[in-house]
Image (spheres, grey):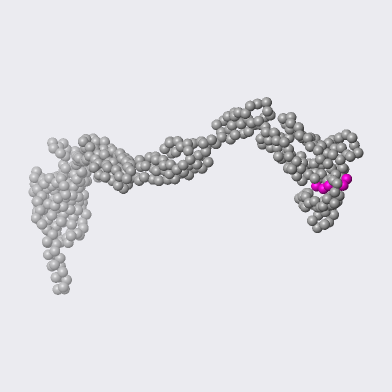
């Protein structure tokens, strides 16, 4: 028991420490204390009066006795006793009343209000918590560009009143007095070669930066500055088989082969030095020869385009020579006949007379045997053919009218010479002719 009693004494001491001197409540109705905000009043035994404006209702009033278990107080509004809620808090029994808002029946010369009377039986404290609505307010702000204010975004200077309410029924207005300073953005793009001076600073490397300039009207300009420092560049151009001339990147025109240097400006304003290695053909036109017979035209050139020229030339006539047009023609001779390839002779002739040489128009072969008195025409075969002893005449007519005639005998006096084998290519294989017969390289007789 001694231990429990000690605790109660200490508890009483602690609770007593919470009591402080407060402003007293009025002791008469005409001297009722006006309460506009939360306040703690001291009350005495007997009648205590407070005045609450209707705009401060509803309100909560809490009676805090000086002792842990004091006598019960009574709260009257307009002569009526109000019901309380009792609770034990802060080391003592408390009484709490809710004063509701009402519509006044009386006429008030001043602000409508209600008088609350508290009858107490001891000295105590009275906590009064009225409804306190926010008052109209003015806010002066200077911002850059824009501001978000009670759910709205403002970008222009001006006065913007905003009416507000809350769940307690309060209505008030907050007015924004706004000054907006504008921000403008401008890019500054500078390029230099090796170095660049900008606003008294020399830059030798590329850099990006941002600065802010205040303007006379209070606004500002933000500059995004990009400085690009470039350096000379070098390149090589190799050009072969150039026709006529070469246009360099700078626009300079070169007409002769050689090594040159060309200089242009690159995108950063630096020199771009280009080595040129040029092989230029002054006249690269194609000359197409057109041949004509003497007396039908004159030698001249006719330029159809810049790169295509017709060159008119007179045919050159050349007398056939037996040593080349008879090559490979006589395959074998015998005493009474010869193995002759007339088609080979025609091929030799036509192959020789090309380009500027006057071409062959046609070739006529005539033959007269030893027993005949007149010539008759013979036709060459696809390969060598045996022709009896006699005389063959070859008549070559050229396109311009020239005629060449040549004779040859088709027999020999030495029969032994005829027995000498002769080799030639026939149908892609080596064929040996001996005594009028065909043999392959193995000695086998061919049909």
Asked if residue 64 is positioned above or below residue 207 in the image, the reply reads below
Rendered residue at 14%/73% (across/down): 2
> What is the number of callouts on the image?
0
Residue 103 visible from this viewpoint: no
The foreground one among 347 and 187 is 347
The foreground one among 9 and 303 is 303
Asked if residue 339 is positioned above or below residue 282 in the image, the reply reads below
Where residue 179 sits: x, y (%)?
A: 22, 37
Where residue 409 sits: x, y (%)?
A: 83, 41
Q: Is residue 66 left or right of residue 167?
A: left
- In magenta, the rendered stretch is 331-336
Rendered residue at 56%/35% (across/down): 285
Rendered residue at 67%/33% (across/down): 316
Q: Is residue 34 left or right of residue 291?
A: left
Q: Say if the magenta span includes residue 395.
A: no
Q: Residue furthest bottom?
A: 2
Rendered residue at 74%/29% (across/down): 401
For the N terminus, which image quadrant?
Answer: bottom left
Q: Is residue 418 left or right of residue 259?
A: right
The foreground one among 236 and 378 is 378
Q: Quadrant of residue 214?
A: top left
Q: Quadrant of residue 341?
A: top right
The foreground one among 6 and 307 is 307
Residue 258 visible from this viewpoint: yes
Q: Residue furthest right?
A: 371
Where residue 145 sits: x, y (%)?
A: 27, 39
């Amino acid at each position: 028991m001694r231990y429990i009693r000690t605790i109660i004494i200490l508890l009483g001491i602690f609770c007593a420490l919470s009591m402080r001197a407060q402003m007293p409540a009025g002791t008469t109705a005409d001297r009722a204390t006006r309460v506009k905000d939360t306040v703690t009043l001291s009350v005495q035994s007997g009648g205590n009066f407070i005045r609450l404006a209707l705009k401060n209702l509803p309100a909560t009033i809490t009676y805090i006795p000086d002792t842990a278990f004091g006598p019960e107080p009574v709260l009257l509004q307009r002569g009526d006793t109000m019901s309380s809620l009792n609770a034990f808090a802060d080391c003592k029994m408390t009484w709490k009343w809710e004063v509701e808002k009402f519509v006044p029946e009386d006429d008030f010369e001043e602000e409508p209000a209600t008088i609350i009377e508290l009858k107490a039986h001891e000295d105590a404290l009275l906590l009064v918590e009225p409804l306190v609505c926010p008052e109209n307010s003015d806010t002066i702000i200077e911002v850059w560009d824009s501001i978000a204010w009670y759910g709205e975004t403002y970008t222009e200077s001006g006065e913007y009143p905003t009416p507000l309410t809350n769940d307690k029924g309060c209505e008030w207005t907050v007015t924004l007095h706004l000054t907006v300073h504008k921000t403008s953005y401008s890019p500054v793009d500078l390029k230099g070669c090796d170095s660049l001076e900008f606003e008294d600073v020399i830059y030798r490397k590329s850099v990006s930066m941002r600065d802010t300039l205040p303007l006379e009207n209070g606004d500002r300009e933000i500059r995004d500055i990009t400085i690009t420092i470039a350096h000379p560049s070098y390149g090589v151009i190799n050009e072969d088989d150039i026709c006529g001339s070469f246009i360099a990147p700078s626009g300079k025109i070169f007409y002769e082969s050689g090594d040159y240097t060309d200089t242009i400006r690159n995108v950063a304003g630096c020199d771009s030095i280009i080595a040129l290695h040029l092989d230029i053909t002054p006249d690269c036109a194609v000359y197409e020869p057109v041949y004509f017979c003497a007396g039908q035209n004159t030698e001249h050139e006719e330029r159809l385009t810049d790169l295509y020229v017709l060159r008119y030339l007179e045919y050159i006539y050349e007398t056939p020579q037996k040593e080349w047009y008879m090559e490979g023609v006589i395959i074998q001779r015998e005493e009474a006949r010869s193995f002759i390839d007339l088609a080979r002779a025609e091929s030799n002739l036509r192959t020789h007379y090309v380009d500027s040489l006057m071409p062959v128009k046609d070739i006529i072969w005539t033959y007269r045997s030893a027993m005949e008195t007149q010539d008759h025409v013979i036709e060459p075969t696809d390969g060598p053919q045996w022709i009896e002893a006699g005389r063959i005449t070859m008549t070559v007519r050229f396109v311009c009218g020239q005629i060449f005639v040549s004779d040859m005998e088709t027999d020999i006096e030495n029969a032994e010479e005829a027995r000498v084998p002769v080799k030639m290519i026939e149908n892609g294989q080596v064929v040996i002719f001996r005594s009028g017969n065909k043999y392959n390289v193995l000695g086998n007789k061919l049909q």
